[in-house]
Image (spheres, rainbow, N blue to C red):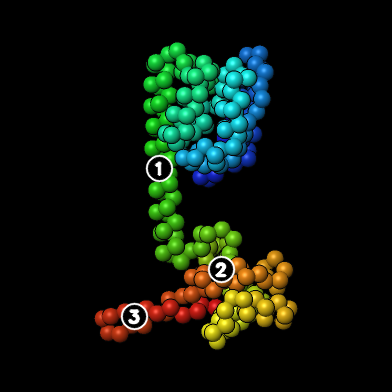
Amino acid sequence: MYLRISQDKKLENFETLVNHRTLLESFACKNGFTFETYEEVLSGGSSELGKRPQLQRLLNEIETFDAILVVELSRLSRNGLISETVLQYCKDYDKPIITPEKVYDLANNDHDVLTFRFGALIASQEHALIGKRSKNNKIQMARAGLYISGSPPFGYVRNPKTKKLEIKEEEAETIRYIFTLHSQGLGSFKIRDILNAEGYKSATGKYFNLSSIKRIIKNPVYKGWTVFHDRKKVKKEWQVYL
């Protein structure tokens, strides 16, 4: 039994995984199947089988089973390369794929092979469209000044209503100090040592390390556009936002 939910789809969550598991377990028990469960939460569009550890394990152990049980074919993969790999394993070891609606005999039925490949093509195209829509949506949100990159960076808090970053004053003091030191010509090593010596703490309450200082200095979120209107021309310059 293979279960996968996509981290790309907002409507899919742990509850979806539980629902799929319950559905397949009921189907298996009704038909007298015994099973071992392989499940994972990740993108089905990944082109590398190495990023699908449970599916890889299932294929490595496929010889010990009679069939693969899934909710629907797209749960195996939405990537053409991986779908073809699954197909080849099923043909080589003569293992059908079972869904609650149909049994796909990929080793002996050319029509089932065609259906499998056509379904994989549709699923792959759907994944590409979802990715494109998601990317465009994020671009528009970013242009509107909304923060879309997960946890807010040190020195900011994300307003849940406006979805914009707001300054967290108790942390912003540290950020200002970092940029002040950097503007004086000090490098990341020296800045780290000064902050730790003076008792400044990172977002996790620990001492600053070199990589965190470098990320802060290079992070464009600490910069903002100041717009100067000069008649018909608009000039833009970077300034430290905090």
Q: Quadrant of residue 36?
A: top right
Image x and y of residue 182, in percent: 55, 81
Label 2: which secondary element: helix
The kind of residue tagged 3 is Lys
| Nearer the camera: disc 3 or disc 2 | 2
Q: Which mark is residue 235?
A: 3
Give the number of marks: 3
Above or below — where is 234 with respect to 81? Answer: below
The residue that disc 2 covers is: 215
Label 1: which secondary element: helix
Image x and y of residue 172, in percent: 61, 77
Can residue 114 be seen here? Answer: yes
Label 3: which secondary element: strand
Q: Nearer the viewer, residue 196 or 34?
A: 196
Above or below — where is 58 with respect to 150? Answer: above
Rendered residue at 72%/68% (across/down): 206
Screen quadrant of the C terminus = bottom right
The kind of residue tagged 2 is Arg
* Earlier residue among tags 1 and 3: 1
